Amino acid sequence: EHAKIAFDVLVDLDVGDRRTGILPGEPAVELAKAIGKHARLHVRGVQAYAGFASHVVGFEERQKTSREAMSKAVETAERLAKAGFDAAIVSGGSTGTYNIDSGLRGVTELQVGSYVFMDVDYRRIGGKSGAVYTDFQPSLSVLATVVSTTHADRVTIDAGTKAIDTTTSHRPEVKGRGDLVYSRGGDEFGFLAGSPLPRIGERVELFVPHCDPSVNLYDRIYALRGEKVESVWPIAARRESQS
Amino acid sequence: EHAKIAFDVLVDLDVGDRRTGILPGEPAVELAKAIGKHARLHVRGVQAYAGFASHVVGFEERQKTSREAMSKAVETAERLAKAGFDAAIVSGGSTGTYNIDSGLRGVTELQVGSYVFMDVDYRRIGGKSGAVYTDFQPSLSVLATVVSTTHADRVTIDAGTKAIDTTTSHRPEVKGRGDLVYSRGGDEFGFLAGSPLPRIGERVELFVPHCDPSVNLYDRIYALRGEKVESVWPIAARRESQS
């Protein structure tokens, strides 16, 4: 005997990322029909995360890109409804497009997440009325220590490739020290240049370039209110990046 | 009362990395003298890891670079000995320079480690008699699955920034499929282009560009002999990348 379990499923759409999902429109409807043949699978709509839209610099251009992508998802959901599916869910959006996609008729869910932490990349995409995206404040930082001051032009800190993801084009920023510039120093180290340089043993907080793969490097987050550690959050999903 | 504990210490030398350590020669001797004033600290020699020498492409050029760096360490140890210290230890070297530094008189320890796993970067530095460094065989790979085949020109695998460090200039290589080319697809995804493309659900093994920060992404290593998992090794030091 089979267990009497049914699954609601969303059709994953490739609306421009060329990463995962079926192409929108007719191919998605065909896939839904194939899914529909399974008694225990119920199509409930579409998911269309458009990562390529999230980081478009400049609000107008970002709006244009995201609307174009999400309209493909909305249209596909409408086609599914016409074909007899209960396609009530249209999931997409991101921290970078929350105030764009939320205004689109038919979108029912926003896949925002980075807004809780923010990062250097998101700050640089620009807001609705400015060059810096200030809708959300940075809350995530990596604590590093100055471990060497041998040279006059820079100091070494204990935060390198193992401590901060640096695969994006932006570098970590030192909280409260916009005059310091981070550069990579290998697996365990980073360099800070600028003036005045921090002293040996001094601690600095680094806003990360990209929050997701930086969080992935750690087992826990220390949640502070002011200087007080209010809670320690285990990073439960860290190991779940592969299927 | 103080506990009766004594520590043997090495003087960390900056022989060219400009990362950590005191400058060789007189500054190192001065530091050793300052350390020597502490009754419980005993200078035993120097450590001089020269990361900048490890990845020099071409054996002759690498040999020149590493000899120059390590000779500063050997000379400093000799100065320390003249100044009355028991400076018997000269630690340095790397997987890339093991057959260079082991021939230097005075070097007593090689800090090799990557040779156990190897990676794409080390393969590309060239061996003593060839363009590929074949002294050690690649043993470390990341297992990934093809999760999307929507497009004709490439497939998507579930190995992105969270699964493989890609901060070096080389990309992951697919074991046994030199015709496939990896490119980054974000936090969770990577792309493989080439011909013939692997099928949906197919698994591929990826040799990582840089072993250290890739190992750091995982909690355990599955040790295989042929197709059989002989042991599971916990990665105990994963969290120890910061002081």
Image (cartoon, coloured by chain):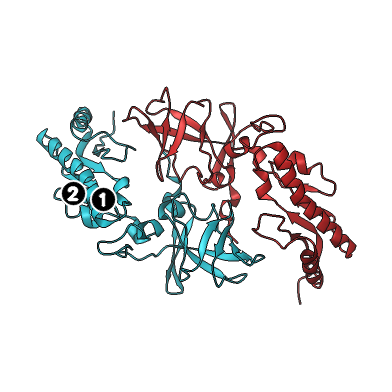
Chain colours: A red, B cyan
In the image, B64 versus A94, the foreground residue is B64
Amino acid on which disc 2 is placed: Val
The answer to whether residue A86 of the structure is visible from this angle is: no
Residue B147 occupies quadrant: bottom right
Do marks 2 and 1 both belong to one polypeptide chain?
Answer: yes
- The chain ID associated with circle 2 is B
- Is residue B164 left or right of B76 when viewed as pictured? right
Q: Position of residue B204 (x, y in %)?
A: 52, 68
Q: Position of residue B127 (x, y in %)?
A: 28, 61
Relative vertical location of residue B40 with respect to residue A75 in this rendering, above or below: above
Relative vertical location of residue A130 with respect to residue B174 in this rendering, above or below: above
In space, the residues marked 2 and 1 are separated at their CA atoms by: 9 Å
In the image, A50 versus B81, the foreground residue is A50
- The chain ID associated with circle 1 is B
* Mark 1, residue position: B93
* Mark 2, residue position: B107
Q: Dot 2: what SS?
A: loop
Q: Position of residue A194 (x, y in %)?
A: 43, 27
Of labels 2 and 1, earlier in sequence is: 1
Tag 2 and tag 1, C-beta contact below 8 Å:
yes
Relative vertical location of residue B100 with respect to residue A119 in this rendering, above or below: below
In the image, A229 versus A101, the foreground residue is A101
Amino acid on which disc 1 is placed: Gly
- Residue plotted at (41% across, 52% down): B212
